[in-house]
Amino acid sequence: MRWVSQRSFSAPVGQIVMMVQPKIQFIQGTDELTIPDVKLTKSKDGTNGAAIFRFDQPSVFDSSKEVGDITGFYMIDEEGVLSSTSVNARFVNGKPAGIEARYIMRTPRDWDRFMRFMERYANANGLQFVKS
């Protein structure tokens, strides 16, 4: 299972409601602009799972010199913040090239909360869920 870019844009219809735009940050207060490739795994009994986010040339590399070090992986939406400290940078020829962040879900409730975040993030960023 994974989320892939669908890049279709449509105008919202109906009532306008002010909500927190779902976002990802590596440095608190600095939004990540690069859209990741996301892969999901889930145990057969559905009690736990993991999400692996891969960012190629993330924008945090451009801003980290100005605003500080990467402190974790933060997924922010109207329900609050999901976070992880499992963040690894990939280097090519000594230069940062990508980031892989892992978010572990240990309960069905964690899984459901993550999926609500991903649905909001996907809708805001043109991602589509593809089962593989």
Image (cartoon, rainbow, N blue to C red):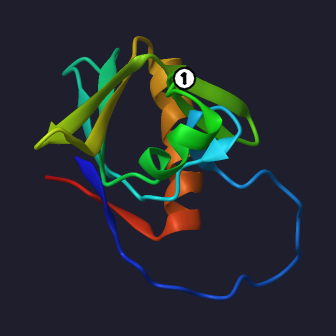
Residue 21 horizontal/vertical position (percent): 71, 55
Q: Residue at x 36, y 75 (%)?
A: 6
Splitting the image into 4 quarters, where does residue 13 fall?
bottom right
Residue 18 horizontal/vertical position (percent): 89, 60
Classify 98 as above or below 21.
above
Q: Residue at x 59, y 33 (%)?
A: 27
Residue lying at the far top of the rendered structure: 106
Q: Is residue 107 left or right of residue 93?
A: right
Residue 118 horizontal/vertical position (percent): 49, 47
The reply to whether residue 31 is visible in this rendering is yes
Q: Residue at x 43, y 58 (%)?
A: 34
Viewer-nearest residue: 82 or 59? 59
Residue underneath mark 1: 83
Q: Is residue 117 left or right of residue 50?
A: right
Splitting the image into 4 quarters, where does residue 39 fall?
top left
Classify 112 as above or below 116.
above
Q: How many badges with numbers are in the image? A: 1
Near mark 1 (Cα within 10 A), the count class, few <14, some 14-19 or many ≥20, is some
The reply to whether residue 52 is visible in this rendering is no
Viewer-nearest residue: 96 or 75? 96
Classify 3 as above or below 105.
below
Residue 131 horizontal/vertical position (percent): 21, 54
Q: Amino acid at mark 1?
A: Ser
Classify 110 as above or below 53.
above
Q: Secondary structure at mark 1?
A: strand
Viewer-nearest residue: 48 or 35? 35
Q: Residue at x 53, y 22 (%)?
A: 71
Q: Is residue 61 left or right of residue 40?
A: right
Splitting the image into 4 quarters, where does residue 14 fall?
bottom right
